[in-house]
């Protein structure tokens, strides 16, 4: 019985890591697409904008959002596994804060995707700056989990 539980834990952990990698890659890439979209110019032909909108939509709906959901589900299973997380320490709380912030950023990107589709998005410079947020959050998450401070 213990071997089955240990194996299940490892499979869920592997699934969690793969989902987090996919989600984070999307969080890094989508703002970069927004930069290209915002800077394509008002007089540009509609084809590049249409291509960018298709890419943005598919990345957000078909890759990022499912990966976020799997990340959350697998992460909650891992976090509630007895003996795995010591909630009296600081690290699970810093990780949880960063994951909630990453989720907020994901939702914000969804809103920005809709804004860009209507021509009311932010500047390319703003999207470049926002592109740094998932990197900072990833650093907090990885340091929290690895160093367990």
Image: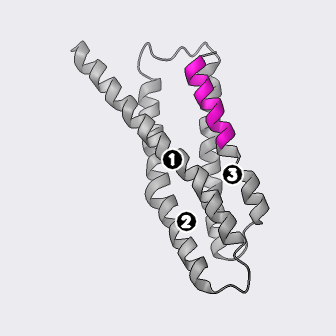
Of residues 133 and 97, the one nearer the viewer is 133
Q: Quadrant of the N terminus?
A: top left
Q: Is residue 140 magenta?
A: yes
> Would you say residue 97 is visible in this rendering?
no
Q: Pointer 2: what residue?
A: 56
Kindly identify the residue that appears in the image at 25 percent across and 13 percent down: 2
* SS for callout 2: helix
Which badge, 3 or 2, is on the more N-terminal residue? Answer: 2
**CB under 8 Å between discs 2 and 1:** no
Q: Is residue 87 magenta?
A: no
> Would you say residue 131 is visible in this rendering?
yes
Of residues 62 and 38, the one nearer the viewer is 38
Measured Cα–Cα span from mark 2 to mark 1 = 14 Å
Q: Residues within 10 Å of mark 3 (few under 14, many from 20)?
A: some
- Identify the magenta region: 135-147
Q: Main secondary structure of the magenta part?
A: helix
Kindly identify the residue that appears in the image at 59 percent across and 37 percent down: 99
Which badge, 3 or 1, is on the more N-terminal residue? Answer: 1
Give how far across and how far down residue 124 sits, in percent.
75, 64
Kindly identify the residue that appears in the image at 54 percent across and 75 percent down: 51
Q: Is residue 54 left or right of residue 14?
A: right
Measured Cα–Cα span from mark 3 to mark 2 = 15 Å
Q: Pointer 3: what residue?
A: 131
State which quadrant residue 136 falls in.
Answer: top right
Give how far across and how far down residue 56 sits, in percent.
55, 65
Q: Pointer 1: what residue?
A: 23
């Amino acid at each position: 019985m213990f071997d089955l539980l240990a194996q299940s834990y490892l499979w869920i952990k592997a699934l969690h890591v793969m989902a987090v990698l996919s989600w984070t890659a999307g969080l890094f890439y989508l703002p970069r697409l927004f930069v290209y979209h915002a800077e394509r110019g008002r007089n540009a032909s509609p084809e590049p904008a249409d291509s960018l909108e298709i890419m943005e939509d598919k990345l957000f709906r078909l890759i990022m959002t499912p990966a976020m959901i799997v990340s959350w589900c697998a992460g909650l299973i891992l976090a509630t596994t007895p003996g795995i997380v010591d909630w009296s320490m600081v690290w699970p709380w810093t990780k949880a804060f960063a994951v909630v912030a990453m989720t907020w950023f994901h939702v914000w990107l969804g809103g920005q995707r809709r804004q860009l589709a209507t021509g009311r998005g932010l500047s390319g410079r703003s999207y470049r700056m926002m592109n740094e947020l998932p990197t900072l959050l990833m650093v907090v998450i990885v340091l929290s989990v690895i160093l367990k401070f």
